[in-house]
Image (cartoon, grey):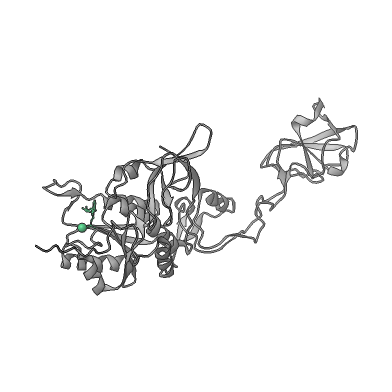
Amino acid sequence: MSIRNVTPQPSCADASDPLSVSVQQASEAIRNALTPISEIEQVPIRSALGRVLGADCISPIDVPSHTNSAMDGYALAGTDLPSQGVRDYTVIATVLAGQTLADRCAAGQCVRIMTGAPMPPGTDTVVMQEQVDLLDDQRVRIDARHRAGQNVRQAGEDIARGSHVFQAGRLLTAADLGVLASLGFGELQVRRRPRVAFFSTGDELRSIGEPLGEGEIYDSNRYSLHAMLTELDAEIFDLGVVRDNRQALQEAFVRASGMADVVITSGGVSVGAADYTKSVLEGLGQMSFWTIAMKPGRPLTFGKIGEAMFFGLPGNPVAVMLTFQQFVRPALRCLASGHWPTSLVVEARCQVSLKKRPGRFEFVRGILSYDDQGRLTVGPSGAQGSGILTSMSRANCFILLAEDCAGVAEGEPVKVEPFTTLLYS
Ligand code: AMP
Ligand code: MG
């Protein structure tokens, strides 16, 4: 009996694959294929958090609008301060925030002033109330430790009238909205949100509320995708589950690309017997079927169906979340704003040793925390199979093991990409 060997094909069991693209190459190709959204709409300032500014913002006023006191104290002319010893002053009036004083303050006089009140005529300096001696109701004594011009906020020192405050394309934060409110803007011009249509593929998938038959599982990808898209402030169209059927897939792709800027699917992009996606897509648009040198998340399809960008994510739930975070999220941000974002990467001490062969970029789900000496430390959040979503839900970061990394020893520093800036574990 003769023994015939099986000829192996490249697979996700290989450490590296000469035909695969790197994470970097895939990101660059996606970036180059993007045309940012340009349509503008107007929204009230309270609805503008996380939206993208549609036009440059020029300040119509000075902020602050008038020169005012930064302290509760006494306003006087800087030239009237004693250069040595002490000097006594008559308090001619009191001015509170929101009031103005028309009277001029002369030499030997001062005005009691509260924080935010406009500086009265003849004054340019404020002495804190804690630094004067009160002689009686109308007289204070000031010594020589003060500097002319101190404790005063100049009109326009934060924002000068006519200055460029924000550029179009800025993703609006809470602080930005405060700045825009301080300029008196109640409505803002913002770019239209990206429209994203998505569906899951697979005969084994059931939606929540349906009974599970033999060999069936609940569709979880649509829910994690929905949540990640909600965080990105996209307009979402959930097209449900599509069966592993050529006709059904074809119809779903055409429908999705007709309504959205971006179409996302999960499953069906590998080489399984029921993976029709590839042949259907080839007939519909220009596609790149990538094997990405990363783990998890190896197969990814990217291309265009009509005007819509298309991301065919893998089926495994962790691979879906990882490829979304690494490729789809920056792409959607860039589509919305014109800027491809950079993720925050920090260094932490690895609590355990990590095995790895050089070849692929590995993303290890991890828990980042501070040790009792205040140093950042990280360890895996659990089993790392690409279907094990619980270790993704426990994780607050990815530990980044670059292509050439050949393993990490316990206590060695590693690069970590936190999911947020607050650490929960
Ligand atoms: P596929 O790429 O379609 O072969 O899917 C790979 C693995 O991911 C299989 O075990 C699928 O059952 C699983 N899978 C695919 N889609 C989903 C989904 N929407 N929710 C949960 N698991 C999925
Ligand atoms: Mg499938």
Give the image location of residue 57, x and y in percent: 57, 61
Give the image location of residue 231, x and y in percent: 39, 51
For the point 29% across and 50% down, the residue is: 386
Q: Quadrant of the N terminus?
A: bottom left
Give the image location of residue 140, x and y in percent: 82, 30
For the point 44% across and 62% down, the residue is: 334
Q: Nearer the viewer, residue 218 or 24?
A: 24
To which quarter of the image does residue 70 belong?
Answer: top right
For the point 46% across and 51% down, the residue is: 49
Q: Nearer the viewer, residue 305 or 402?
A: 402
Kindly tell me whether residue 85 is visible in this rendering: yes
The residue positioned farthest toward the top in the image shown: 136
Q: Is residue 62 left or right of residue 205?
A: right
For the point 47% across and 64% down, the residue is: 338
Q: Is residue 18 left or right of residue 152?
A: left
Kindly tell me whether residue 422 is visible in this rendering: no
The residue positioned farthest toward the right in the image shown: 84
Q: Is residue 130 left or right of residue 353?
A: right
Q: Quadrant of the C terminus?
A: top left
Q: Quadrant of ligand 2?
A: bottom left
Position above or below: 26 against 370: below
Q: Nearer the viewer, residue 259 or 268?
A: 268
Give the image location of residue 255, x and y in percent: 24, 67
